Image (tube, grey):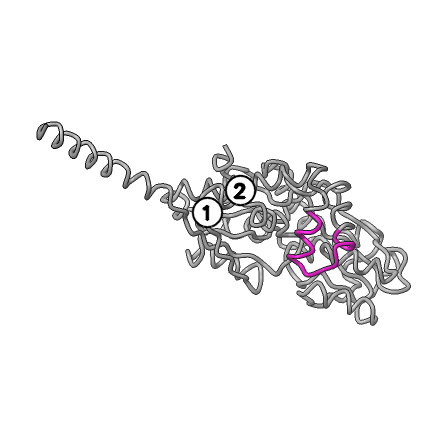
Amino acid sequence: MKTMTRTLAALIALAAIGAAPAARAQQPAEVRVAVLAPSALLWLHAIAKDQGFYDANKIVVKELVAGSSPALLQAVSSGSVEAGISLGDVVIRAVDQGAPVVIAGAVLEKTILRLVGGTGINAIKELEGATVTAGAVEGGTANLLRYQLKRGGVDPRSVKMVALTNSRDRVVALGNGQVKGALLIAPFDTLAEREKMKVLDVYREPYIQTPLIFNKDWAAKNRAAAVGLAKALQKASVWIYDPANKQKAIDILSAYTKVPADVCAGSYQFIVEDQKAIGRNLEVQAAGLENIINIDKDIGANPASSKPFDLSRYYDPSFLK
């Protein structure tokens, strides 16, 4: 009897020893993720939080808002945060300069920026010599605006570019005549339409507006957490295209951006149904990065990259597999 008791005790002890590492392995990993101000750029992130996709992948996201895209990239590159949802052109430049960051997926594989004319502006050609804004005055978004102006018959050198980084401020500036044209992001473009302003142009080609990026050193040492974060956003990218989730997706964007749901419904129609801008499965296509570089070259700007293009220099698809 004593022998059986000792044997049972030993088995229980061994089971406890084996269970401890397993229990530790199941503990959620905290990942600091740098983001920009709330907008449809972060729709998948908002969905992943609301629908429990981060929880399901054992990820606790600590959201840190960066003041600008370069600041966001610097935070990921330096290791101040582990991941970020950045802008494509900024990532291209940083990687070419040796920054230890890698793209893990395409949150937006097409742009959701729309060129909107101010009160009384009905065509792109009417912006010749006008004051316009793309948020910043240099970089990928500004160059996209210059490209759209050129394509519409306007000399980009004739316009005055001003910096208005907040989308709400751009809508106000359009309304009061401070600017005559602006690139607006959802759902603020729909707010402008409600004020009888006209959408003048949309760039429809592949364009990785917002990639998910990782600090390479962190991702190498914390593979499970990196994959979990990528998988959670990948799940959100599939979820949003299911028509059964349409109203819930609209409600999530409304709550996240503090914009009325009926306005966000317009964002769903444009981004999901019309532009199909959200990367299905988050996969990155080469054209989405190449077009950023080609737009820079077309308008004579300093290109995001001057190196022969190689997708693998920027993108590691293994986090999604």
What residue did someone put label 1 on?
59
Q: In this image, 73 relative to 291: left or right?
A: left
What residue did someone put label 2 on?
232
Start and end of the magenta stretch? 249-264
User: Can residue 261 be found in the magenta stretch?
Assistant: yes
User: How dense is the environment of label 2, judged by Cα within 10 Å: few (below 14), some, or many (20 and up)?
Assistant: many
Which residue ends up furthest to the left in the rendered image?
2
User: Can residue 78 be found in the magenta stretch?
Assistant: no
User: How dense is the environment of label 1, judged by Cα within 10 Å: few (below 14), some, or many (20 and up)?
Assistant: many
Point out the image quarter for the N terminus: top left
Residue 65 locus on image (x, y percent): 54, 61
Front position in the image: 310 or 198: 198
Q: Residue at x 16, y 34 (%)?
A: 9
Q: Amino acid at mark 2?
A: Ala
Q: Compared to 151, does 318 lie above or below?
A: above
Helix or strand or loop: what does disc 1 sit on?
A: strand
Q: Quadrant of residue 110?
A: top right
CB within 8 Å, label 2 to label 1: yes
The dominant secondary structure in magenta is helix
Residue 38 locus on image (x, y percent): 63, 59
Q: Amino acid at mark 1?
A: Ile
Q: Residue at x 43, y 44 (%)?
A: 225
Q: Compared to 131, does 36 lie above or below?
A: above
Q: In this image, 140 relative to 180: left or right?
A: left
Q: Compared to 84, does 128 lie above or below?
A: below
Q: Is residue 183 visible?
A: no
Front position in the image: 32 or 265: 265
